[in-house]
Image: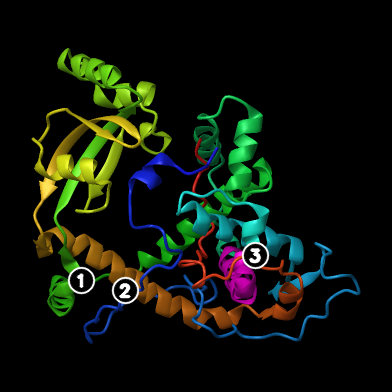
């Protein structure tokens, strides 16, 4: 069940709900020309407008039912009516992503923490539905075989259906069908946005100009790229070191023996860590120990067999290393601007008063809004 994931506990600096906003980079003034003219009727915004309501249609009149009735209309998107029940499902998923990022499972009492943001999240949800509507109008459909695999992969780490359902609940999904539907929506959404991004091309000169104007954003701290296997005792850690010395495969041993569910499924991979990202003993070993050599490290979580595969020095990343990322960012920004001009083709109206009335009483006063409340419906698969 998703509950205080060890990898998240090991990694420090995630105690606050809010994320620090990164200043928008300076984009060169050179015009961007799409390789092809996108079809004007098949676009919608990639992300929600900051605080504005999309083009409005005639006001939606709610049915004469109580606000708690899940069939109560809360928005219209084109000819589609969005109900309170659909919004509540989205609201739970957004809240879950925010608290799960802190290593905490979603519980009903935590939902009230986000109550004041329900009108804003309704705007996001309505715009998300507009994107999905246009994507499907364009003929995009999820790959059933790929969805089956993603669903099976998510479920494979659980020994019983009850464990899987607990993980789904902790991650904001009411049931397995809701989780699968989110996978399908995510696949369609991503495919649609990718199809828009590919229409925009950028020359080397523009990329180099962007890099020079935004060099500060490509500065990076020193990093240690590492993997680990966590076990309860020193004897077990030493035994794993012996197995590695005899030809054992680190990823296989991690999947079989590591008590860290957050990294075991990835073969123990922790990615690249910055100084201070982890607890002191682990941090010291990651940045001062030998490369590509197993180290046995004790922390409050147990005994780690740690292997540091690479270290990156602090400094500005060279253009060659980031040019693909720059092109992707420029394509995303260009697609965003184009798609935002097309949202008016889908008439969207929301009824924020309905979701405000339906909001649960807060039990905690949040410092900020949910950290980057996601509009993209691709879910993070539940973890054991």
Residue name at image x 48 percent, y 73 percent: 39
User: Is label 1 or label 3 in front?
Assistant: 3
Q: Which residue is mark 1?
A: 217
Q: Indicate the secondary structure of the residue bearing disc 2.
A: loop
Q: Is residue 121 magenta?
A: yes
Which of the marked residues, 2 or 3, is nearer the chain's N terminus? 2
Region in magenta: 113-134
Contact? badges 2 and 1 (CB < 8 Å): yes
Q: Which residue is mark 2?
A: 22
Distance between mark 1 and mark 3 Cα atoms: 38 Å
Please provide percent x and percent y for residue 278: 27, 48
Q: Indicate the secondary structure of the residue bearing disc 1.
A: helix
Q: Indicate the secondary structure of the residue bearing disc 3.
A: loop
Reply above or below: 379 against 245: below
The answer to whether residue 368 is left or right of residue 348 is left
Distance between mark 2 and mark 1 Cα atoms: 9 Å
Figure quadrant of the N terminus: top right
Q: Which residue is mark 3?
A: 363
Residue name at image x 39 percent, y 67 percent: 19
Please provide percent x and percent y for residue 20: 36, 71
Which of the marked residues, 2 or 1, is nearer the chain's N terminus? 2
User: Is label 2 or label 3 in front?
Assistant: 3
Contact? badges 1 and 3 (CB < 8 Å): no
User: Is residue 327 in sight in this rendering?
Assistant: yes
Within 10 angstroms of label 2, few (less than 14), some, or many (20 or more) residues?
few
Residue name at image x 41 percent, y 61 percent: 194
């Amino acid at each position: 069940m998703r509950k205080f994931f060890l990898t998240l506990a090991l990694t420090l600096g995630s105690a606050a709900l809010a994320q620090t906003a990164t200043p928008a980079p300076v984009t060169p003034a050179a015009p961007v020309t799409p390789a092809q003219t996108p079809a004007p009727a098949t676009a919608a915004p990639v992300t929600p407008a900051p605080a504005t309501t999309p083009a409005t249609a005639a006001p939606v009149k709610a049915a004469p039912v109580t606000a708690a009735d899940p069939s109560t209309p809360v928005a219209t998107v084109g000819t589609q009516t969005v109900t309170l029940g659909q919004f509540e499902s989205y609201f739970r998923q957004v809240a879950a992503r925010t608290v799960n990022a802190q290593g905490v499972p979603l519980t009903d009492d935590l939902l009230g923490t986000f109550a004041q943001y329900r009108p804003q999240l309704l705007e996001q949800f309505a715009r998300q539905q507009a994107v999905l509507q246009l994507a499907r109008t364009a003929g995009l459909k999820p790959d059933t075989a790929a969805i089956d695999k993603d669903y099976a992969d998510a479920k494979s780490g659980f020994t019983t259906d009850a464990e899987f359902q607990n993980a789904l609940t902790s991650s904001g999904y009411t049931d397995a069908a809701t989780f699968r539907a989110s996978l399908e929506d995510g696949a369609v959404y991503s495919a649609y946005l990718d199809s828009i991004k590919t229409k925009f091309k950028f020359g080397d000169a523009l990329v180099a100009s962007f890099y020079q104007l935004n060099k500060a954003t490509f500065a990076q701290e020193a990093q240690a790229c590492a993997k680990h296997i966590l076990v309860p005792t020193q004897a077990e850690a030493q035994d794993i070191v012996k197995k590695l010395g005899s030809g054992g495969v680190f990823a296989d041993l991690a999947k079989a023996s590591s008590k860290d569910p957050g990294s075991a499924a990835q073969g123990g991979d922790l990615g690249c860590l910055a100084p201070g990202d982890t607890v002191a003993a682990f941090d010291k070993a990651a940045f001062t120990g030998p490369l590509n050599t197993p180290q046995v490290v004790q922390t409050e979580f147990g005994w780690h067999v740690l292997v540091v595969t690479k270290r990156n020095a602090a400094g500005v990343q060279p253009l060659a290393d980031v040019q693909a990322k720059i092109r992707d960012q420029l394509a995303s920004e260009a697609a965003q601007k184009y798609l935002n001009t097309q949202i008016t083709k889908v008439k969207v109206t929301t009824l924020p008063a309905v979701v405000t009335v339906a909001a649960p009483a807060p039990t905690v006063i949040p410092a900020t809004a949910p950290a980057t409340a996601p509009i993209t419906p691709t879910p993070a698969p539940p973890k054991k």
